[in-house]
Amino acid sequence: MVEQNWLDPLLAGTLASKLTAEVFESYLLLPEAEYTIRWEKIPGLPKFCALDVDSLVERTQARLRMWQSLYPRVYSPYQRPYLAGVAIAQQKLSPEAVHSLSRLLIGLNFRQLGLFLKQDELQIAQRFVMLIAEGIILLRDPITPFDRLPQLGRSGSGGSGHMGIEPAKTISSTTALRSSEQDILSASLATAAQRIWKIVCVDDSPSMLNEIKRLLESEAFEITLINDSKRALMQIVSIQPDLILMDVSMPEINGYQICSLLQKAPNLQHIPVIMVTGNRGLLDRARAKMVGATDYLTKPFTQKDLLAIVLRYLGH
């Protein structure tokens, strides 16, 4: 990716470091785990970052202790929080906090929320744990394949059996949230509540447009549907969206042609363009990259697939 100018070396180093830390988090939760450090130089490959493994393990264990202090209410960063009900939330939260939560909790897991809010997912979980104890927020189980990862409360090489982690203290469900806690919650979500992401969907199929709108249904998104490819470019210029979902196969002007035109306009070429198609061939993907598409979403797709790719680029 660096060689093809998709990433600069500094960003590649940051990415490699974060991916390594993420892998270690799950690895250290395994019931039985051993690791051996094997240093091996591979000629011709550039160095993007230097990792101190001992320091990495120590930081990861400290982070796991904080995650495990939330157990059993939270047992995975891939659990998906959702509002139990607006009426329930209104009994204990300010209107601003209820509004923010109703916009944010749209089926994303803690890690996706962290990307969306540009905050640490652990801090988000820590802010939510009181709301979970109160029954205001409920948690759905992780989606496959994340449900196969070790749970935070189980013993492992980095687990509670070896690290002396005590379960989170029981909090009475009748305890009302203090005004100071409400203020912290509202302030932490205020930026996200104010931001509305503009998404343009271009497809000649009204049914597909309506399905995408249904899957992305949220007050956080302002979705514009365009089913006439000839008018798409002018509408995109007018809207200046944060992201574009573009069907490939459309009559008269197809998605590749529109994407190519977008790349020639200085005020539009920064907008992420996700090509949506039923074609799975490598040649189709290569062609999409050649005309400047940011990514590729293959039909049929689920809400999880769509949200994941949308948030990946809105998070930038």
Image: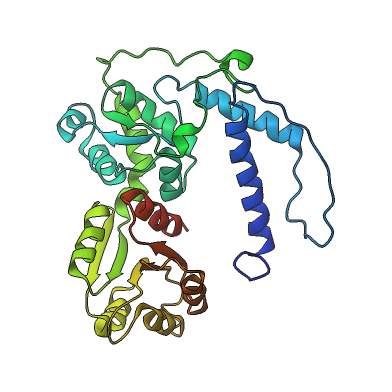
Image position, residue 286 (x, y; %): 52, 73
298 left or right of 12 in image: left
- Report the front residue among 1 and 199: 1
26 left or right of 199 in image: right
- Report the front residue among 2 and 290: 290
Quarter of image, res 309:
bottom left
Image position, residue 264 (x, y; %): 46, 85
93 left or right of 243 in image: left
118 left or right of 176 in image: right
Quarter of image, res 186:
top left
Q: In the image as oriented, which residue stretches furthest toward the left?
A: 87
Answer whether residue 114 is visible to the viewer in this image: yes
User: If the image is split into quadrants, where does the N terminus sit?
Assistant: bottom right
Q: Residue at x 70, y 35 (%)?
A: 56
Image position, residue 127 (x, y; %): 40, 31
Answer whether residue 77 is visible to the viewer in this image: no
Q: Residue at x 76, y 39 (%)?
A: 52
Judging from the image, the colouring scheme is rainbow
Q: Residue at x 78, y 32 (%)?
A: 36
- Report the front residue among 32 and 124: 32
